[in-house]
Amino acid sequence: MRSRTFLRAEQLGLRWDAPGLMAGVDEAGRGPLAGPVVAAAVILDDLQPIRGLNDSKKLTARTRERLFDEIRAKALCCCIAEATVGEIDQLNILQATLLAMRRAVEGLRLRPHRVQVDGNRLPVLPMPAEAIVQGDAKVPAIAAASILAKVHRDRLCLTLHERYPHYGFDGHKGYPTAAHLAALREHGACADHRRSFAPVRAVLVGTE
C-alpha cells in the first residue's frame, strides 16, 4: 500500500502557517542491535522558553538529563512512545520508527495543528506534517523531542544492562561496537536483540 505521508499542507486545503499548536518529533535508536526504537513528540510553551535546546547528540549526558526534566516540566505537553523489537523485526526499522513517531503524536494530550519531524520521512498523520533534515539542530521543539527520546532510550539500555550485564549495554547502548559484537559472538543473542539486523542474524545462523 502506497504511503500518503508526503502530502503538502496546500494539497490538504490547509495553510501551513495557520495559527495553532506545533509539535516537534524525533527518534532515538535506529542503529542499535537491541532494544526498542523510541520516538518523542513535544509541544513547547512559548511563555516558558527552555534555554540550551539542541540536537541531543551534541549535548553531554548530564545536560540531556537536566533538559529532560525541564522539558517535561515546561512543555505544554509531550509524549514518549516505542516500537518493540518484535515490531522492528516484523516491519523493518524504518517502518517501526515511523510507527513510534505516530504513536508519540497520537499520545499527546493536546492535538497539534501541524507537526515537524526530524529527517526526510514522515509518519502517516491526520494533520499537516513537514520533514526537516537536521531539524533537531534547527527547530527547538524537534530538539526537545530528540532529548526526550535519547534520555528515555539510554535509561532503557541501563535496564538491559541490569538484565544482561555481560553485553555491556550501559556503555555502547546497543550500538554495534567492537565490544558488543565480541559479546554477541561469545554469548549469542538475548531476547532483546533485533534478529533482523545482520550482525545478530549472523550469530543466530552460526548457532543453528
Image (tube, rainbow, N blue to C red):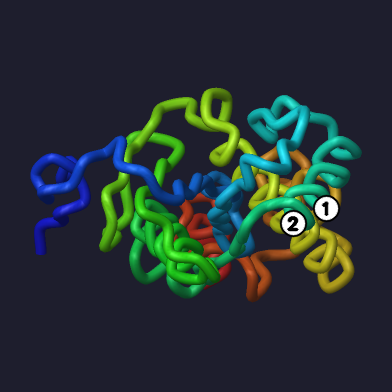
- Residue type beneath disc 1: Asp
- Residue 36 in the figure: left or right of residue 93: right
Q: Position of residue 180 (x, y in %)?
A: 73, 48
Q: Residue at x 53, y 24 (%)?
A: 138
Mark 1 crowd level (few <14, some 14–19, many ≥20, 10 Å Cα): few
Label 2: which secondary element: helix
**Nearer to me, 71 or 148:** 71
Q: Residue at x 54, y 48 (%)?
A: 27
**Nearer to me, 48 or 120:** 48
Label ID, residue 188: none
Task: Give the residue at mark 1.
Answer: 69
Q: Position of residue 197 (x, y in %)?
A: 48, 54
Q: Residue at x 54, y 39 (%)?
A: 142
Q: Quadrant of the N terminus?
A: bottom left
* Label 2 with label 1: CB-CB less than 8 Å: yes
Vertical relation: 163 (above or below) 142: below
Q: Position of residue 3 (x, y in %)?
A: 16, 56
Q: Residue at x 57, y 68 (%)?
A: 207
Vertical relation: 15 (above or below) 137: below
Q: Is residue 65 visible?
A: yes
Report the Cα–Cα distance between label 2 and label 1.
5 Å
Q: Is residue 88 visible?
A: no
Label ID, residue 72: 2
Q: Tell me how many marks there are.
A: 2
- Residue type beneath disc 2: Arg
- Residue 81 in the figure: left or right of residue 50: left
Query: On the image, which quarter does residue 58 sit in?
Result: top right
Q: Position of residue 126 (x, y in %)?
A: 26, 62
Vertical relation: 193 (above or below) 153: below
**Nearer to me, 92 or 21:** 21
Vertical relation: 177 (above or below) 5: above
- Residue 28 in the figure: left or right of residue 90: right
